[in-house]
Amino acid sequence: MKKKTLKTVVITIILILVIFFIFKYIKTPDVVLDPVNLADPFLGPENAAIVVVEYSEFQCPYCAAAFGTHDVLVQRFKSQMPSWEPSVPGLEQLAREGKIKFVFKHFPLAGHEYAQKAAEAAEAANAQGKFWEYHDALFEKGGAFDDDTLIEIAEELDLDVSRFKAELKGDVYARSVRDDMREGQRLGVGGTPAFLINGQLIEGAQPFQVFEEAIASLEE
């Protein structure tokens, strides 16, 4: 009886020590939030050393200024800083030259009626390989669009309009758009446009020069 009791005590002590070891020395690794996933639309090399992630929305005037299509804001910025140039065309060019990977993320703001639906429409276009064409067309509309406009753009780009309409009506991409926004909020994004350059946050319609300097510092 004593031997059995002793054996039980020894086993219990060993189990306690094992559990103690697990909790003391084997820690859950810190979660590193990667803002880029395989489904995200991007330009440039997939495995580029420098990754620029833009959080944007299609009814945001400052996002349109960063794209270069909001004439009033572009002229205002140029009057304040004659050397000011919109950042997005420059970043897209760097991506096409293979110098960076440029990724687009959605961040629809609550005050803009069609921001969420426009983002979903862009994702529906992305599913048919026409994200960037649809992206450009939305910004060229200057934020003035409705359901009919979203469909008209799809027709102009020769998308499968029946599929496009069905996906838009079924809110197929609503969750992925919301996921983009929640992810951006966790990374410190509070408004649009916002950019992450290898994790470094740059907010607002900053001149392209700011991005050139940030990218150059990473290349050194």
Image (spheres, rainbow, N blue to C red):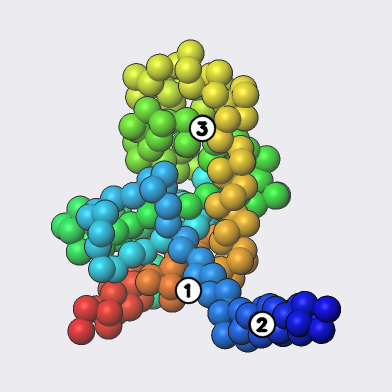
Front residue (pair 196, 1): 1
Residue at image x 53%, y 19%?
Answer: 165
Tell me if mark 1 has few (under 14), some (14-19) or many (20+) residues whose alpha carbon lies within 10 angstroms of its own.
some
Task: Pinpoint residue 21: horizontal percent, then vertical percent.
Answer: 61, 84
* Residue 43, position as x, y percentages in the image: 29, 50
Q: Give the mark nearest the N terminus, 2 or 3.
A: 2
Circle 3 is placed at which residue position?
121
Q: Secondary structure at mark 2?
A: helix
In screen coordinates, is 129 left or right of 107?
left
What amino acid is labelled 1 in the image? Answer: Leu
Amino acid residing under circle 2: Ile
Q: Residue lying furthest top in this view?
A: 162
Task: Determine crowd level at label 3: few under 14, some 14-19, many 20+ residues with C-alpha closer than 10 A.
Answer: many
Q: Position of residue 33 (x, y in %)?
A: 51, 66
Name the element at disc 3. Answer: helix
At label 3, the amino acid type is Ala
The image position of residue 145, as x and y in percent, is 56, 33
Task: State left or right for residue 196 relative to residue 61.
Answer: left
Q: Pointer 3 and pointer 1: residues touching (CB < 8 Å)?
A: no
Total numbered circles: 3
Please, what secondary structure does the residue beneath circle 1 have? strand
Q: Nearer the viewer, residue 42 or 190?
A: 42
**Identity of the residue drawn at 27% across and 83% down:** 217
Residue 155: image quadrant is top left
The residue pinned by badge 1 equals 201
Left or right of residue 85: residue 200: right
Mark 2 = which residue?
14
* Labelled pair 2, 3 in contact (Cβ < 8 Å): no
